[in-house]
Image (cartoon, helix red, strand yellow):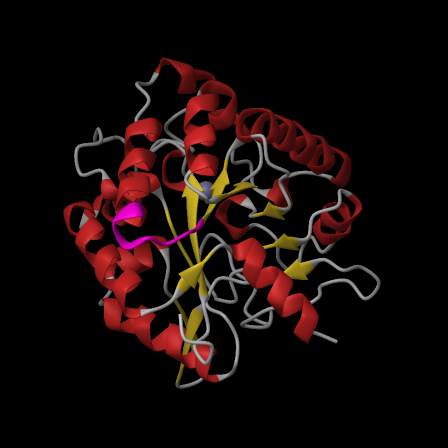
């Protein structure tokens, strides 16, 4: 990569296709173990896709997944990717109190470190659930020794969002080294438009390209994310979920892998721990 170009953070939120906000009211956590797992095959497809282009990425993984699929976590680590935490079982942080969040962090990290054999220093809140409601979450992350979090989406959205948050790296606490790296949004006519995950799948890739170049032009790394289930057109259909959730979850799954290949080829990418370290040296 030429030194004048900014590497962006490439990230995957590793969870089963059914461990998503869209299905939380129709699929009970108690039933998760009875549903056929697809996370290992789906994440394997993502690892193959990354290997094709030689990129390294960060895999924010549920402790629940690491406990059941330790070989997958080892495979991620051995391919040179970063294993980071996505919490234990996808409970949103703003539904927990501080001691519960602390326990969730510790349980997930232990499972991820046991399986991957690497120190876990990064965290992404399920459904970007750190916002103006729960700034105490940053205090917990700093106390637990995390170097960075990538848990904020600076958008207005029906399920999440912290519109007033900065669009790129900031220190959320005055007295701690912890860095927050929000997911990249496009700033257009005074609005913030979300770009990763289902937004990337459903909207033209040009919007994500625009957002990445926009933050790069301001001298910062962009942060992109998606999920392993988004490259799996064969996943089961949950007909009893609300129509809007089904549209969001199942739209354009078959086109995702090709769209990702194009995005990966058009920008420079790296692990988020490396980006956090670089941003930490630049921030006051
Ligand atoms: Zn997630």
- Residue 141 is left or right of residue 85, and the answer is right
- Residue 197 is left or right of residue 182, and the answer is left
Q: Quadrant of the C terminus?
A: bottom right
Query: With respect to residue 263, does 225 lie above or below?
Result: above
Where is residue 241 shown, x and y percent of the image?
Answer: 29, 35
User: Between residues 73 and 14, which one lies in front from this camera angle?
Assistant: 73
Residue 219: in sight, yes or no? yes
User: Between residues 201 and 249, which one lies in front from this camera angle?
Assistant: 201
What's the residue at 56%, 71% (across, down)?
168
User: Between residues 263 and 127, which one lies in front from this camera angle?
Assistant: 263
Assign ligand 1 to one image quadrant: top left
Where is residue 62 shown, x and y percent of the image?
Answer: 51, 33
Span highlighted in magenta in the image = 51-57
- Residue 150 is left or right of residue 18, and the answer is right
* Residue farthest to the front, as pictured: 2
Query: With respect to residue 159, does 264 lie above or below?
Result: below
Q: Quadrant of the N terminus?
A: bottom left
Residue 242: in sight, yes or no? no
């Amino acid at each position: 990569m030429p030194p004048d170009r900014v590497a962006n953070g490439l990230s995957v939120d590793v969870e089963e296709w059914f461990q998503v906000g869209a299905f939380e009211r129709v699929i009970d956590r108690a039933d998760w173990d009875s549903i056929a797992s697809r996370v290992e095959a789906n994440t394997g497809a993502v690892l193959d896709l990354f290997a094709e282009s030689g990129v390294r990425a960060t895999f924010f993984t549920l402790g629940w997944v690491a406990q059941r699929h330790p070989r997958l976590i080892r495979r991620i680590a051995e391919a040179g990717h970063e294993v980071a935490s996505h919490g234990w079982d996808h409970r949103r942080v703003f539904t927990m109190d501080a001691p519960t969040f602390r326990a969730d962090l510790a349980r997930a990290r232990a499972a991820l470190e046991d399986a991957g054999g690497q120190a876990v220093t990064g965290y992404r809140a399920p459904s970007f659930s750190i916002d103006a409601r729960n700034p105490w979450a940053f205090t917990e992350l700093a106390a637990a020794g995390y170097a960075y979090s990538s848990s904020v989406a600076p958008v207005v959205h029906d399920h999440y969002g912290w519109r007033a948050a900065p669009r790129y790296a900031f220190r959320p606490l005055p007295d701690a080294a912890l860095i927050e790296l929000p997911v990249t949004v496009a700033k257009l006519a005074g609005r913030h438009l979300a770009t990763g995950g289902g937004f990337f799948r459903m909207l033209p890739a040009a919007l994500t390209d625009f957002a990445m170049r926009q933050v790069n032009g301001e001298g910062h790394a962009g942060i992109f994310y998606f999920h392993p289930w988004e490259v799996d057109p064969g996943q089961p259909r949950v007909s009893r979920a609300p129509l809007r959730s089904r549209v969001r979850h199942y739209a354009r799954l078959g086109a995702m892998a090709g769209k990702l290949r194009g995005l990966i080829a058009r920008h420079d990418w790296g692990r988020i721990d490396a980006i956090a370290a670089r941003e930490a040296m630049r921030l006051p």
